[in-house]
Amino acid sequence: MRATVLIRPKPGILDPQGQAVESSLRHLGFAVGEARVGKLVELDVEAGDGAEARAQVERMCEQLLANPLIESYEIELADEP
Amino acid sequence: MSGRPLVAVPVFPGSNDDRDAVAALERVGARAVAVWHDEGELPPRTAAVVLPGGFSYGDYLRCGAIARFSPIMRAVTAFARDGGLVLGICNGFQILTEAGLLPGVLRPNASLTFVCRDVRLRVERTDSPFTSRCDERRVITIPVKHGDGCWFAPPEVVAELEANGQILLRYERGENPNGAVGDVAGLCNEAGNVFGLMPHPEHAVDPLLGSTDGALLLGSLVDACRLSAAALV
């Protein structure tokens, strides 16, 4: 099963990378508001069903993929029933 | 015992300050031994652990996030939980926060640039195993060199650390090189036996390099090792 994990800087957390992207876009003439930069992780997960896969990926996020102090995550499963 | 306490310096793929750490520790009176990251145990009679700076595992995902799962880190975590002295420098500090041995997290510098220069630091407490030799010198100069040194913790955590006196080192006014909350340059755990800092004391032990203030911190650690060894006899 294909899992996509979207990791975002939590609201209120300073995101200097997002600020740099935002100011570069403005320099290019784009009228953008706040830009935030996160990460995307794609995984193949071996699991019997969607619920099991989701539970596994949640554990991955808690233990490694995200730092809960500064990042939130969202999981999408491709073959979820 | 020879009087030279044994300090283990774990080496991860991508560590690059391990040799300087070993040399600096030897210089201040320790017997320092590099230990490869896939060792499951620390050497017998290890008196302290110094996690060196560098870019373990290429800083992939987040700085220190992968090194934390190395076999040696299981041993270091157990050692710390038993009250063993652990010092993390730069990447070592990042690993300690990711491992949950120290509070907060090190984020990309607010400037987004790599900073490499001497900084003046205020030693907030000298009654710790890592700062005892700073009694006469409360402001010390030690270099930083990092891209991810912006220490962050939620306000309630910062308040608790302040109340407990866990913030041992701060950047002097106007010196904060990375945007760290509260100008925090180094802090310890609640028990006081685990300490992490972004500046590099191992690069400041020889007058040739501009400062010997790093020897005050590393020497404090060696003193503390001797004291705890004496307490065991």
Image (tube, coloured by chain):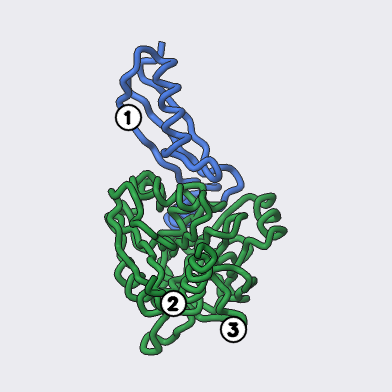
Chain colours: A blue, B green
Q: Which residue is mark 1?
A: A43
Q: Which mark is residue B117?
A: 2
Work out whether residue B34 or residue B82 is closer to the camera in this orientation and state it: B82
Q: Which residue is mark 3?
A: B137
Distance (Cα) linking label 3 and label 1: 52 Å
Q: Residue B3 appears at what percent x and percent y? A: 41, 74
Q: Residue at x 69, y 58 (%)?
A: B164
- Pinpoint the chain carrying mark 1: A
Q: Which mark is residue A53?
A: none
Q: Residue at x 38, y 85 (%)?
A: B206
Q: Are marks 3 and 1 on the same chain?
A: no
Q: Residue B226 appears at what percent x and percent y? A: 48, 71
- Disc 3 + disc 1, Cβ < 8 Å: no
Q: Residue at x 44, y 76 (%)?
A: B143
Mark whose residue sits in front, 3 or 2 = 3
- Pinpoint the chain carrying mark 2: B
Q: Secondary structure at mark 3?
A: loop
- Disc 2 + disc 1, Cβ < 8 Å: no
Q: Is residue B147 in view from this perspective?
A: no
Q: Secondary structure at mark 1?
A: strand
